[in-house]
Amino acid sequence: MSDTMLERMKKFKKIDAHSHIGNFGGWAGVRMTAEELIAQMDEYNFEKAVISTFPADESIAAVDKYPQRFVGAVWVNPWDGAKALDQIRSAVEDHGFRAVKLHPLSQAYLPNDECVFPVARLARELDIPLMIHTGHPPFSLPWSVAQLAEMYPDVRMVMIHMGHGNGMYIQSAIDMAKKYPNLYLETSGMPMHNKIKEGYDTVGPDRIMFGIDAPFHHPTVELQRTLVSGLTDGQLEDVFYNNVKKLLKL
């Protein structure tokens, strides 16, 4: 990597729209403490990071300890019913969390399953977005997220990974976001640099945001993809900082 590219990576003020702390064993074999994430953020000029853990206790503790650096997205399992709703309300009202994280693939439900409806209604009541993992069959495909967006047009929903690693799912995420104005895109783990610019140009300049998905991805990989996407410096400022700040009312 050239010194010039590294300098550009550190140049822009940034908010990471999607990362994690904790120990992810099994197939992933990665881990990161809150302090390690903050050190990484400092190295690459990140003002804040949106974090989630399941269960939520570890992210709640981190947000309480480092409120100037971390923004909470409370990760719940909709199958837990009233318990999940109580977790959301407590995280938002008692700990200042700004979003709900849903991972349909990990917890085996479709985004448009009935178990998600109470979560969407509470997000509407609390005026916070849903941040939904997308890109893996059978549980997290973009058109299922789009069906939920159609049912709840007044709830903002972020398609985390904007389709992830499959080109057809990436294009579907963009196409669904073009159709539904309450759908947003997040870039982490999505390999196609040109689709970042396409999303900015065709979905809207305020509906695509940058994420790392730490500790699963390294910031240099995610940053380089975005920097070579063809966006101008002003447009990069939207993706790196302005859009997530506006969405989460930071």
Image (cartoon, rainbow, N blue to C red):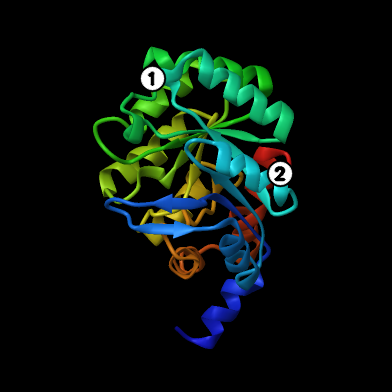
Q: Is residue 219 visible?
A: yes
Image quarter (top left, top right, bottom left or bottom right) of the C terminus: top right
For image coordinates 67% across by 39% down, the residue present is 248
Q: Secondary structure at mark 1?
A: loop
Say which amino acid is labelled 1: Asn
Q: Secondary structure at mark 2?
A: helix
Disc 1: which residue: 112
Image quarter (top left, top right, bottom left or bottom right) of the N terminus: bottom left
Which sits in the foreground, 225 or 177? 225
Say which amino acid is labelled 2: Asp
Q: Are marks 2 and 1 in contact (CB under 8 Å)?
A: no
For image coordinates 61% across by 44% down, the residue present is 206
Above or below residue 156? Residue 247 is below
Disc 2: which residue: 64
For image coordinates 35% across by 43% down, the residue present is 163
- Cα–Cα span, label 2 and label 1: 32 Å
Where does the image place residue 177, in percent across and percent down from the top left? 46, 35
On the rendered structure, is 219 left or right of 124?
left
Which sits in the foreground, 181 or 154? 154
Q: Is residue 141 visible?
A: no
Where does the image place residue 239, in percent across and percent down from the top left? 58, 54
Above or below residue 150? Residue 225 is below
Marked residue nearer the N-terminal end (2 or 1): 2
Mark 1 neighbour density, 10 Å: few (under 14) some (14–19) many (20 or more): many
Where does the image place residue 242, in percent across and percent down from the top left? 68, 51
For image coordinates 27% across by 48% down, the residue present is 166
Where does the image place residue 167, in percent across and percent down from the top left? 28, 49
On the rendered structure, is 94 left or right of 33?
right
Which sits in the foreground, 23 or 100? 23
For the view shown, which residue lies furthest in the bottom direction? 3
Above or below residue 207? Residue 31 is below
